[in-house]
Amino acid sequence: MATTDLTALTATAAAAEIARGTLSAEDYARACLDRIAAVEDEVRAFAHLDPEHALAQARALDRRRSEGLPIGPLHGVPVAIKDIFDTADYPTECGSPILAGRRPHDDAAVVAKLRAAGAVIIGKAVTTEFAYFHPNKTRNPHDVERTPGGSSSGSAAAVAAGMAPLALGSQTNGSVIRPAAFCGVLAIKPTHGLISRAGVLMLSRVLDHVGAFARSVEDLALLLDVIAGYDPADPDTRPYACPAFRAAAAEEPPLPPSFALVRTPVWDKADAEAKAALEALAKELGAREIDLPPYYADAWQAQRAIMAADMASNLGVFVDKGGETSQALRDILAEGRKVTAVEYHAAVRDARRYAESLSEIFEQHADAIITLSARGVAPVGHASTGDPAFCTLWTLTGLPAMNLPILEDAQGLPIGVQIVGAPGRDERLLRTAQSLLAARSKKAPRRKRAKA
Amino acid sequence: MATTDLTALTATAAAAEIARGTLSAEDYARACLDRIAAVEDEVRAFAHLDPEHALAQARALDRRRSEGLPIGPLHGVPVAIKDIFDTADYPTECGSPILAGRRPHDDAAVVAKLRAAGAVIIGKAVTTEFAYFHPNKTRNPHDVERTPGGSSSGSAAAVAAGMAPLALGSQTNGSVIRPAAFCGVLAIKPTHGLISRAGVLMLSRVLDHVGAFARSVEDLALLLDVIAGYDPADPDTRPYACPAFRAAAAEEPPLPPSFALVRTPVWDKADAEAKAALEALAKELGAREIDLPPYYADAWQAQRAIMAADMASNLGVFVDKGGETSQALRDILAEGRKVTAVEYHAAVRDARRYAESLSEIFEQHADAIITLSARGVAPVGHASTGDPAFCTLWTLTGLPAMNLPILEDAQGLPIGVQIVGAPGRDERLLRTAQSLLAARSKKAPRRKRAKA
């Protein structure tokens, strides 16, 4: 197999080849590193990269396999890790000069799980400053003049550019789904509490989610099988068994999945082209249109109050010490310090009410909500990472959400489709995504034939 | 057995007689009701009482037993319930005229558990206004000129006066341990999250605890066996198995329990007589003296910030609607509305730190902390329910605490001894209490003989 082809493999396919012995972890890591070497100057996806260390991990994994030792489900698969996840072998600087050179003692809980599953931690992916809005160096692989989105900028760009088949990110507002949409990759922001955040920079216990990027649904499921589950160090994870994500995602649904088109109160912010494309898709899928009651318009303010107050609690120390920070960060912390505990509690209570009332959609009307992941394609320029508004409601309510890169504009730039599932039913959302992608890939050639 | 003797029975003894058939639930309930009729004018422990309804419950229980149907561990045992616990068959007014005549649809989770275990819900015990400071009508059975303490005023007084062998209360600051101390009964405020608060008026999710009153350690253990445990409706309960409290409390400890005398930063507030009595007891027990570091002095402010902010969130609606409220309530809500989310989060974080640092005492030095339950004996007058300061730290940290009525002043009024255990080891604290009481009852006669 030529090195140049290897970066096109899915993680699932590569892991299978490595397990069979038809591909070495070293060759696969080298292919990813070659790809990084070729495009990193343009894309700038990595905050910390150490090719020799990555190759050493891969060679150690090859030795384990050759010695007949047990191998994990991600044996030899490179994973890029957002630079707010602690890693014992790379710096973890959270995109801020204040933390320059910081070396954690331990891996974050999910990084440790990845290592135990045989993953190669290929490098630390660029994050915006403290995973908030102030942009960092990454550029969109589809068009370097455009933002990759944020805050998980490097994770989305790395997967989109073939630098790694898998990446970890995090979302407190729209930091996984938005960059995935702009970079045209699959991503999941699972149900709140599905994945441990121990060892990950905390912005907000209520809003923070670990999320993942990949180029296939199966790869996302494979990754969730490794990283999901109870961790006493994260009080929002629950001591219940996890579903078998990969098995569930591969199942044929008993009926074709049903969808509810939910435009949300921010619909007017979307570009005309994106709105039209999503509405056409919803029609094609037979989606039922559901309008949310007017009080949903307040959800964005509730998310803002919680995020600002929690960031002020968790990051205030960095600003107080007078380190180098952006105006955007100082502004949100100043805003957060004005939020009263009563306002905060009311916002958290509202979040729970929104979640409960959205549950009715899944109980009565549809398997998944379908909506946009962002206003449209990635905006031109690097002064901002774009508007997270299309993700806010699903983050606030903790519902599982995915980005599917299945629409594009006239120039071929990706427009993200967001599907949102019932809380705690992440495996069903993956199955729904798989089934939607399969239906479209069947339909597309048929349509072409009809035109010909 | 003469009716007049029955109210002296412990719940454990009465339940055993009823199970054996040597006592009927009806006779036992009638004995308690007779006692209530005799002393209620003086003590005023009940907010809602319906003797016919209580007797009807007892008769139904007797029928069950006579029909050979299964009976629970509290079959025929009367329990008084603080009037902030919802009950489907009595009003639940939370000590406020705003809720006059309120009839909940459902029982609180623990009330339902009591019923399922065969308890007779004998009436609703008086609470201060919304379980906060403003006193209600109850008077101390030892001296009606004195306060019974609060907020679980009626629960403590009912058990002390022989009106019921068991009562439920709640504690957000010092509302179980303090009235137990003033009324001279045993009580436990278990580890935070041990007992579900679903269906109980919420002041503060962080601070609220369900607690229990009885006249023996065994009775408290019997009650915990029924009401402790996981409830998905209370997110602070955990889905783990509970210890067998009664069995554990009855065990002989492998070594005599060791104690740490912790005076806490509020020690100077205590009466000289109470301090001297507690110090003499600590000496007798060979307790090691442990001084808390100076930063513990801030714990009282942290508890206040959390309580005020949470009460403003949870009870603000009552004041806003302009109903009849006390100045004390309006003041704490006004104070709570000024607490910022950042201050609130910092207080919650501090609470966790205090709890962690206290854990060292149990790991390294002692089975239990010994300290005072209150400043001293119940104060004269009914304008206040006394100072909760001696309970604040143990409520803030969620540690299990008990009141033991084993000291008294020169007039014979009870001085409460508070023992505090390691978090989640409530069954060990009960065993420690049992062993301490047994040692004292052995010693007391010996001392008398020595004097004679």
Image (cartoon, coloured by chain):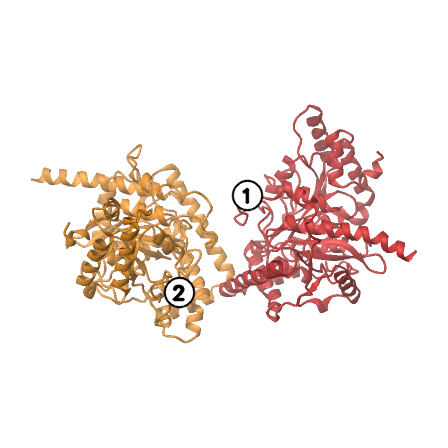
Chain colours: A red, B orange
Label 2 marks which chain's residue?
B
| Residue B223 in the figure: left or right of residue A16 | left
Residue B229 position within the rendered picture, expressed as x and y whole percent measured from the top left: 41, 48
Looking at the rendered structure, the secondary structure element under dot 2 is loop
Which three-letter amino acid code belongs to the residue tagged 1?
Asp
Task: Identify which residue, B179 or A33, lies in the foreground.
Answer: B179
**In this rendering, does residue A358 appear at all?**
yes
Q: Give the percent coordinates (x, y) of residue B129.
A: 34, 67
Q: Secondary structure at mark 1?
A: loop
Quadrant of the rendered image containing residue A275: bottom right
Q: Position of residue A221 (x, y in %)?
A: 68, 44
Q: Quadrant of residue A451?
A: bottom right
In the image, taking residue B174 as reference, residue A212 lies left or right, namely right
B338 sits left or right of B189 in the view: right
| A104, above or below A405, in the image | above
Furthest-front residue in this view = B67
Q: Chain letter for mark 1, please.
A: A
Q: CA distance from mark 2 to mark 1?
A: 38 Å
Residue B266: % across, % down = 32, 54
What label sits on residue B312 in the rendered view? none
Identify the residue under disc 1.
A231
Q: Which residue is outermost to the bottom?
A: B322
Amino acid bearing label 2: Pro
Give the quarter of the figure containing the C terminus of chain B: top left
Specify whether disc 2 shares its chain with disc 1: no
The extreme left residue here reads B452
Nearer to us in this view, B69 or A227: B69
Q: Is residue A141 visible in this depiction of the protein?
A: no
Q: Nearer the viewer, residue A287 or A56?
A: A287
What residue is shown with label 2? B104
* Rendering quarter of residue B268: bottom left
